[in-house]
Image (cartoon, rainbow, N blue to C red):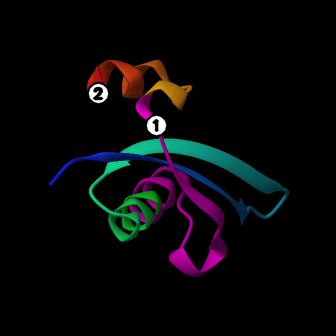
Amino acid sequence: MQTKIFRVKGWFQKPWQKQVFVKELPALSEQRAIERIYSEVGSKHKVKRNLLHIEEIVEIKPEEAKDPRIRAMVS
């Protein structure tokens, strides 16, 4: 199986503000990318899964990635 690059856009509510995020990550499938977002964002920001809202998930080409670590990983 080949690793794909996904760009995930979403938001979560903290007590004082709405925090918007855009994250690019490698994953084998869209479902695995969603699970990884729940895991990473939830762990880093102490947000439960039901408070994390994913608005968009798009598969992108490696050259479209804005994160230099992702571009270096797939090159």
Q: Secondary structure at mark 2?
A: helix
Could you say where residue 59 lies in the image, as x and y percent from the top left? 49, 51
Could you say where residue 9 lies in the image, as x and y percent from the top left? 65, 54
Q: Quadrant of the N terminus?
A: bottom left
Residue 10 on the magenta span: no
Question: Which residue does the image show at 56% across and 26% down from the upper left?
Answer: 66
Residue placed under numbered mark 1 in the picture: 61
Question: Which residue does the image show at 49% across and 61% down from the upper left?
Answer: 42
Which of discs 1 and 2 lies nearer the camera? The answer is 1
Residue placed under numbered mark 2 in the picture: 74
- Which corner quadrant of the image does residue 5 belong to? top left
Question: Mark 2: few, some, or many residues within 10 Å (few <14, many ≥20)?
Answer: few
**In the displayed structure image, the side of residue 44 where residue 12 appears, left or right:** right
Question: Mark 1: few, some, or many residues within 10 Å (few <14, many ≥20)?
Answer: few
Residue 56 on the magenta span: yes
Nearest to N terminus: mark 1 or mark 2: 1
Q: Which residues are magenta?
A: 38-62
Question: Which residue does the image show at 57% across and 66% down from the upper left?
Answer: 47
Q: Secondary structure at mark 1?
A: loop
Q: Amino acid at mark 2?
A: Val
Question: Which residue does the image show at 42% across and 31% down from the upper left?
Answer: 62
**In the displayed structure image, the side of residue 75 where residue 5 appears, left or right:** right
Q: Amino acid at mark 1?
A: Lys
In the displayed structure, 71 sits above or below 44; it is above
Q: How many marks?
A: 2
Q: Nearer the viewer, residue 18 or 63?
A: 63
Could you say where residue 65 lies in the image, as x and y percent from the top left? 51, 30
Q: Quadrant of the C terminus?
A: top left
